[in-house]
Image (spheres, coloured by chain):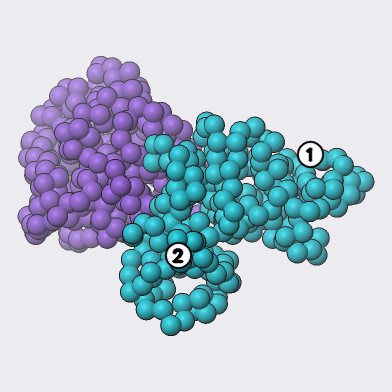
Chain colours: A purple, B cyan
Amino acid sequence: MQNHKFTISNRNPVKKIGITALVPPELIFSCGVAPFDVNNVIPASKKYPGNKLCAWTAIWKDMLVKKEINVDSLVVVAGGDCHNALVDGQKAAMSGIPTHFFFYPFDGDTSYMESQLHRLSRFLGGIKSPEKFKEIGELKKQGQLLDKKRCNGKLSSSDAFSILISFSDLAGDPAGFSRAISALEEKDIDIRNRVALIGVPPIFHDFHETAQSLDLQIVFDELPYEFIRHGGGDVQEIARDYCDYTFARPLEFRIDFLKKELKRRRVDGVIHYTQFACHHMLEDEVLREKLDYPLLTIQGDLPGNTPQQVKLRLEAFREMLDRI
Amino acid sequence: MIGLDVGSTAAKMVWIENGDVKFRITSTHNWKELVEGIDGDDIISTGYFRKSVPHRASLTELTAAIYGVRHYFPDAQVIVDIGGQDTKVIDVRNNNFVINDKCSAGTGAFLEFVANYFRIELNELGSMHAIAKRVPDINNTCGVFALSEMISQLVAGYSKEEVIAGMHYAFARRISHMIPQTQKVVLIGGTVKNKGMVAALRDVMNIDVLIPDEPQIINALGALNYYP
């Protein structure tokens, strides 16, 4: 799910493959095609779908059906992450877009994962450029460095987020994306409140700036971190690694991972973003119980600016962190 | 120094004089009357309009509520602030809070809506509740549909007073779902002047319900206390 603040010109006439959630970009690029995360355009889209549960899936479905997003084919992550995508993905498929449904294993079974990756590879026409695995791996190392800089106050959380969130598709152009990373300017940021943002990314395009303006510095973005921490040199390796994609695994697996990450980043508090009508909302009470940090739950529905009601909650949360 | 709480429906000003809490209240749109002749540097603001009024410092009404309630109830565990446009529940024990601002049911706006329907003043709801002999069930959690249900109960033969009592119970149940396990709650906000609603909440929750003498000024007092 992306919110680009940079433009990369991509003149390569490679086929554009829509993806609805994390699909190993290493594999997509190695098949000689380019991923396009259809969530890219949503936060700034000003689209208000009529018939919806989750606005994320409803908007990309509408835009795909109406050809407002043009892709050559679509990979829907239908198992192990977003439940609404299974239905909205089928609706997009019914409009005539060649569509493949990708399923992560809930139990982390690597052979199942490998079979899913082989099926995906066949759908995409087979691996043509195996060197892409390494190339994307190198880029992800840059992403990890950038994440570290943000954590150490050398990058603003909004700058870091705009790049990290785009690691799902590397803007369809790894070389251009690499230049965009290099162009980021280092800063000296006085971090007063170290905050982790967990859950799906907010649908508000200015969320990180808003949090920053209220003295809440986001030092961990849960989902974008998944975009930079997985990889491997071939299908077998990425099958093993992507099996640990926390959103697809049992909640306890994800919580164990979160505990380590929150400790490592010395966070003061946690913001749990929930999307209206998303099944992840149901996880809130468990996260509250299991994560031993002050935790603010916020909910978003439609794209746009961060609403005043959410700003009030953020400000009150900051005041609370100041008190303790 | 004064505490100024400019909320969605009322503006409240608090100051301390010879150790006593003094206050003035007006409608939101007349807030300027309250601060006439007062330097902005002497104002600590809170409420929806906290950043739109002159102020030396501002704080959210959630934090202000904690500091204001402490003035009267130092060991408060849970605070329920029923405002004109939203209801906030603050769990002081673990620094947690929830806000209902997506639905009018369970806010002062809903009670106003009901009072308008019956063509009565808002402050008459409590006295009418007191003379109800029966309490009809009103189950709807949506303010608009709750009104349809109230009309059905009137058609079924319940008196206006009884239907108002039923509405207070529906309101109380809605609020109670937001309140965590606790021995006692402190209620604040203009809406808790409605004795019928408070009686219903006491009955539904079956816990100690504490209310300061002037529940509407607590956030303004909290703003003042936050910056000693």
User: Residue A19, position in %: x, y?
Assistant: 32, 42
Which residue matches tag 2? Answer: B18
> Looking at this view, is A111 or A275 the one in front?
A275
**SS for callout 1:** loop
- Residue found at the far front of this picture: B18
Q: Residue at x 55, y 40 (%)?
A: B185
Amino acid type, callout 1: Asp
Amino acid type, callout 2: Asn
For the residues beneath circles 1 and 2, the answer to whether they share a chain is yes
Q: Residues within 10 Å of mark 1 (few under 14, many from 20)?
A: some
Q: Residue at x 46, y 33 (%)?
A: A282
Q: Is residue B218 left or right of residue A173?
A: right
Q: Is residue A212 left or right of residue B136?
A: left
Question: Where residue B137 is drawn, which disc sits there?
Answer: 1
Q: Residue at x 33, y 22 (%)?
A: A252
> Looking at this view, is A190 or B198 the one in front?
B198
Q: Is residue A40 visible?
A: no
Q: Is residue A164 visible?
A: yes
User: Residue A190, position in %: x, y?
Assistant: 14, 55
